[in-house]
Amino acid sequence: MTDMPFRLRERLRVRWAETDLQGIVFNGHYLTYFDVAITEYWRAIGKPYPAAFVGTGVDLFAVKSTVEYLAPARYDELVEVGCRAARLGRTSIAFELAIWRDGERITRGEVVYACADPVARCAIPIPLPLRDAIEAFERG
């Protein structure tokens, strides 16, 4: 994981239902926070998921998720989730993610998606328009 800037940052408030009895976010919810940021990433590059993919012969399947817990988030705190496309392979996209509370990084992770034919469910190259949109967004 790098300290590269994240072009997309999404603010969230920790809800009661996301916490355990101590008021600390239950570990699985960090992946939900990552998913919210990735959803907003697609919207930010002009390819909202799933609408922009319907009928194109392309879909995305999560193939890897990692989360590193550095410090806990707690009930009612505002957190900021950062998302960036860290690597574009021939058939995969690796998103780097991070969560901050008051400027302190409390979580980091990665979610990797395979670009695939939705019917055959086999990997296919990332379509050029999608690759171009990601690269343009990351360049700023």
Image: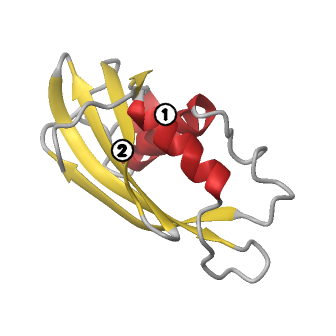
In percent of the image, x 31 and y 38: which residue is there? 25
- Relative to 131, is 2 on the left or the right? left
- Relative to 82, is 58 on the left or the right? right
From the image, state whether disc 1 or disc 2 is nearer to you: 1
139, 43: nearer the viewer: 139
How far across and how far down the image is residue 134, in percent? 51, 43
- The answer to whether residue 23 is seen in the rendering is no
Q: CA distance from mark 1 to mark 2?
A: 24 Å
Disc 1: which residue: 137
In percent of the image, x 18 and y 50: which residue is there? 1
Judging from the image, the colouring scheme is secondary structure
Q: Secondary structure at mark 1?
A: helix
In percent of the image, x 75 and y 83: which residue is there? 120
Q: Amino acid at mark 1?
A: Phe
How far across and how far down the image is residue 53, in percent? 75, 52
Name the N-terminal-most of marks 1 and 2.
2
Q: Amino acid at mark 2?
A: Tyr
How far across and how far down the image is residue 61, in percent? 58, 66
| Placement of the C terminus among the 4 image quadrants | top left
26, 93: nearer the viewer: 93
How far across and how far down the image is residue 27, in percent? 31, 49
Disc 2: which residue: 30
Name above or below for residue 5 compared with residue 97.
above
In percent of the image, x 32 and y 43: which residue is there? 97
Other-residue count near label 1 (Cα within 10 Å), few / some / many at <14 / 14–19 / ≥20: some
